[in-house]
Image (cartoon, helix red, strand yellow):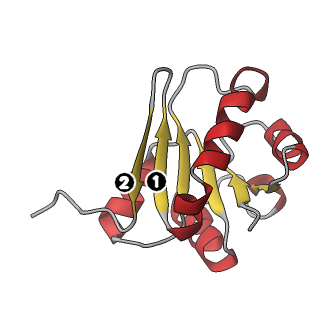
Amino acid sequence: MTLRLLIDMNLSPSWVEVLREAGFEAEHWYLIGAPNAPDSELFAWARENGYIVFTHDLDFGALLAATGAESPSVFQIRTDDVSPETLAPRAIDLLRRFSPQLSAGALVVVDEMRERIRILPLESSLP
């Protein structure tokens, strides 16, 4: 199964071609919805259309936790340099490695040193 990735507004549209060349389906939000749409709108579209959110935005992890949602999966980049030129080889490797988990429902967080994966739904830390 090919992962379908929705690139968030905070990442360059050049990610689309890089990810497509690596064998993924990829779309950038600017071609789908309003550039200033709330994260919840992008989140809902990704869930309804079977896409994984590919983002640099921390809000999606919070949305997953707050809603207890089982989808969409989120691939969250937490590095200073989010350019495809720098990050693509590692991101592509991790997308392939965690493809089963992302297909089933997961939050993958990638920083400079490591990656973490949490299976959905996330437990909310709220009482």
Which residue sits at x=79%, y=53%? Answer: 30
Which residue sits at x=39%, y=65%? Answer: 120
Residue position for label 1: 107
Label 1 crowd (10 A; few <14 / some 14-19 / many >=20): many
Q: Helix, strand or loop at disc 1?
A: strand
Residue position for label 2: 62
Image height of 109 relative to 85, above or below: below
Which residue sits at x=31%, y=64%? Answer: 66
Which residue sits at x=87%, y=49%? Answer: 20
Q: x and y percent of residue 11 in the render?
A: 69, 38
Q: Residue flagged by tag 2: what amino acid is it?
A: Ala
Q: x and y percent of residue 80 in the render?
A: 56, 20
* Residue 114 appears in the rendering: yes
Q: x and y percent of residue 63 in the render?
A: 40, 60
Label 2 crowd (10 A; few <14 / some 14-19 / many >=20): few
* Residue 38 appears in the rendering: no
Left or right: 61 as drawn, with respect to 73: left
* Quadrant of the rendered image containing residue 51: bottom right
* Quadrant of the rendered image containing residue 46: bottom right
Image quarter where the N terminus lies is bottom right
Q: Nearer the viewer, residue 92 or 33?
A: 92
| Mark 1 or mark 2: whose residue is earlier in sequence | 2
Q: x and y percent of residue 117 in the render?
A: 42, 48
